[in-house]
Image (tube, coloured by chain):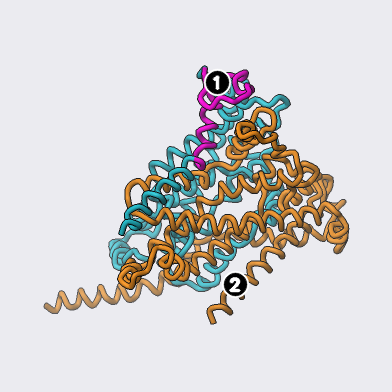
Chain colours: A cyan, B orange
């Protein structure tokens, strides 16, 4: 009996210690980003900055082009949301219609999940190049515009929509697009939330496609811009950490707000 | 009465009539089409393009002038197999897989079981800490760790000096650099695996544990006799997906070390990227990517088969 009461405490303490260790790099990122350059080089390092300055954040926008990178990243994310509409359409099609080749096409969708990015890297570049879409934001967003996994999620959810509801709407003379827009999508809000959060994370964090597709600074996203900070001749830790914070903080905010949905989305990815 | 009956009949005929017409209509194809077109273009078509390009000498000049591209058969594959850097990249990838996958699968399982130990608010709050690395940008994460690893002013070496140890060359010693890069990927990868394990843990009916408690089982027995056996599928799933992602290991070495020092952290993916986009040897890089794809496909198929056999 004594054991049963003490063990959650011990486990909790160990887990809390692990959580602090896991979170520490983010804490270090924030405090370093607020240090003056000279202090970031001092030895021994200071964990809490003795002087707090926002200069590094200012420099990202003033001396570097992070304002543009931020806008580009937001545009890529927004294009991703258009992609989510295609995903919803496809999910609805697979969930609620019977048509020739459906089984094969759905299998085709699922099989694309197994193709590694390294194989698609060069062909995608060649395909986008022949479409004159390299070095454009659309080109950056296009390879990940539609996620097979999200189609799967949407199909699973939309299968639960009652057929009678759709039939009733058809009898009332509603067109298919209207049914999708004013019946199917409003019912699908929970799955749209999961898909939306996953789409945001994918677009915001996307690194390899902007790296390959964007050749000139005009089209860089935050992730590419930040990786360039690593190649600066003189290492500037506060500047690097300010850049990292700029990428991490919005994701953490989204995560805190939508934690439930993210966990749900990952869970569905795992075991259904 | 007859009027209603007639109306009902008309309606039911309508209902019965309309769906077949819809089923043969273009509607579902229009719905599925755009998404399918994109997926097929960027993944199915890609494999064929990669396979075809791997048999040519396509490079940056060939891109401007397709007439200059020549079919060279298996030439790229021959050059690759005689390139020591290719074998080193393959060896490094094997090293990363052998270090990373067991650590992640076992570590995440332990953490997930511990997090599932209590349903209290404190334990729920702790979860978020373990999840966050999984959703943050790898580029940002690598910069942060690069700073911690820095050999002159980094925090880790300072901590070592506190306990009287000599500074470690985290990213410049070939062997240590491999481990340092792997550590970052383990830290980042654990969140996703923990989420999947937690979901599986919560699906285990509590009655099993209650029955075990009645029989006098202690916590360890519950873990090894109930939890782990019931988690077999989740463990299998996490192992397969983690293995696939580590065979594709790319971002951490790309940002932290650029594959150095002297190729020590160059994974297969990084090798493909460098051949393709640093040296612009698209044909050669495609050949390497086909080899990696074949390895991943074979390893995954072997695992699936082992699983089917163990179930049978």
Q: Are marks 1 and 2 on the same chain?
A: no
Residue at image location 85% in from the left, 54% down from the top: B84
- Residue occupying the far left of the picture: B1
User: Residue B189 colored magenta?
Assistant: no
The reply to whether residue B113 is in sight is yes
A120 versus B188 height, above or below: below
Residue A220 placed where, x, y %?
63, 35
Of tags 1 and 2, which is closer to the observer? 2
- Image quarter of the N terminus of chain A: bottom left
User: What's drawn in magenta, residue-wise?
Assistant: A21-50
Taking depth in this image into account, of A159 and B187 the one nearest to the observer is B187
Q: Chain of mark 2?
A: B
Residue A32 placed where, x, y %?
56, 27
Residue B192 placed where, x, y %?
51, 53
The reply to whether residue A224 is in sight is no
| Residue A58 numbered tag | 1
In terms of secondary structure, where does tag 1 sit? helix
Taking depth in this image into account, of B5 and B259 the one nearest to the observer is B259
Taking depth in this image into account, of A108 and B11 the one nearest to the observer is A108
The answer to whether the residues at label 1 and label 2 have Cβ atoms under 8 Å apart is: no
Taking depth in this image into account, of B163 and B177 the one nearest to the observer is B163
Quadrant in which residue B174 is drawn = top right
Predominant SS of the magenta segment: helix
Q: Which residue is label 2 attached to?
A: B304
| Residue B290 numbered tag | none
Residue at image location 65% in from the left, 36% down from the top: B149
User: Residue A35 colored magenta?
Assistant: yes
- Image quarter of the C terminus of chain A: bottom left
Density class for disc 2 (Cα within 10 Å; few <14, some 14-19, many ≥20) is some
Asked if residue B286 lies left or right of residue B297, the reply is right
Density class for disc 1 (Cα within 10 Å; few <14, some 14-19, many ≥20) is some
């Amino acid at each position: 009996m004594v054991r049963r009461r003490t063990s959650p405490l011990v486990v909790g303490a160990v887990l809390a210690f692990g959580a602090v260790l896991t979170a520490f790099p983010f804490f270090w990122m924030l405090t370093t980003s607020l240090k003056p350059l000279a202090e970031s080089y001092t030895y021994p390092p200071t964990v809490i900055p003795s002087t707090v300055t926002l200069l590094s954040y200012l420099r990202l926008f003033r001396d570097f082009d992070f304002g543009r990178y931020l806008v580009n990243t937001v545009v890529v994310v927004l294009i991703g949301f258009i992609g989510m509409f295609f995903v919803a359409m496809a999910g609805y099609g697979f969930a609620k219609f019977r048509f020739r080749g459906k089984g094969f096409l759905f299998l085709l969708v699922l099989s694309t999940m197994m193709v590694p990015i390294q194989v698609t890297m060069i062909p995608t570049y060649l395909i986008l190049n022949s479409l004159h879409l390299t070095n454009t934001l659309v080109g950056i967003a296009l390879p990940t515009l539609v996620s097979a996994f999200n189609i799967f999620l949407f199909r699973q959810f939309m299968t639960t929509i009652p057929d009678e509801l759709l039939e009733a709407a058809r009898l009332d003379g509603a067109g298919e697009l209207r049914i999708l827009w004013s019946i199917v999508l409003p019912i699908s809000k929970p799955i749209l939330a999961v898909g939306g959060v996953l789409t945001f994370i994918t677009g915001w964090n996307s690194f390899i496609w902007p790296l390959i597709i964007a050749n000139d600074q005009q089209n860089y996203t935050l992730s590419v811009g930040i990786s360039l900070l690593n190649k600066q001749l003189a290492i500037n830790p506060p500047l690097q950490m300010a850049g990292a914070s700029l990428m991490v903080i919005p994701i953490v905010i989204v995560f805190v707000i939508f934690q439930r949905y993210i966990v749900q989305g990952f869970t569905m990815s795992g075991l259904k | 009465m007859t009027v209603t009956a007639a109306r009902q009949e008309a309606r039911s005929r309508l209902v019965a009539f309309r769906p077949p017409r819809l089923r043969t209509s273009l509607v579902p194809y229009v719905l599925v089409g755009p998404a399918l077109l994109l997926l097929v273009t960027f993944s199915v078509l890609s494999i064929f393009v990669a396979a075809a390009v791997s048999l040519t000498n396509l490079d940056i000049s060939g891109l401007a002038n397709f007439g200059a591209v020549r079919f060279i058969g298996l030439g790229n594959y021959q050059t690759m197999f005689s390139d020591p850097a290719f074998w080193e990249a393959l060896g490094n990838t094997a090293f990363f897989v052998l270090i990373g996958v067991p650590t992640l699968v076992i570590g995440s399982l332990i953490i997930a079981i511990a997090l599932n130990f209590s349903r209290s608010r404190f334990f729920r709050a702790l979860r978020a800490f373990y999840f966050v690395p999984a959703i943050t940008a790898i580029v940002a994460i690598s910069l942060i760790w690069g700073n911690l690893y820095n050999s002159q002013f980094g925090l880790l070496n300072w901590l070592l000096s506190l306990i009287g140890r000599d500074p470690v060359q985290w990213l410049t010693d070939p062997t240590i650099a491999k481990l340092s890069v792997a550590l970052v990927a383990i830290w980042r990868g654990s969140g996703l695996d923990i989420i999947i394990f937690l979901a599986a843990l919560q699906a285990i009916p509590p009655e099993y544990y209650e029955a075990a408690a009645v029989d006098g089982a202690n916590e360890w027995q519950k873990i090894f006799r109930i939890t782990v056996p019931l988690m077999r599928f989740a463990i299998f799933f996490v192992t397969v997906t983690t293995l696939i992602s580590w065979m594709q290991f790319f971002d951490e070495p790309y940002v932290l070390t650029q594959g150095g020092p002297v190729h020590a952290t160059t994974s297969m993916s990084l090798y493909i990227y460098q051949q393709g986009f640093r040296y612009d040897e698209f044909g050669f890089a495609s050949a390497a990517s086909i080899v990696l794809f074949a390895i991943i496909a074979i390893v995954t198929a072997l695992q699936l088969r082992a699983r089917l056999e163990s179930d049978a």
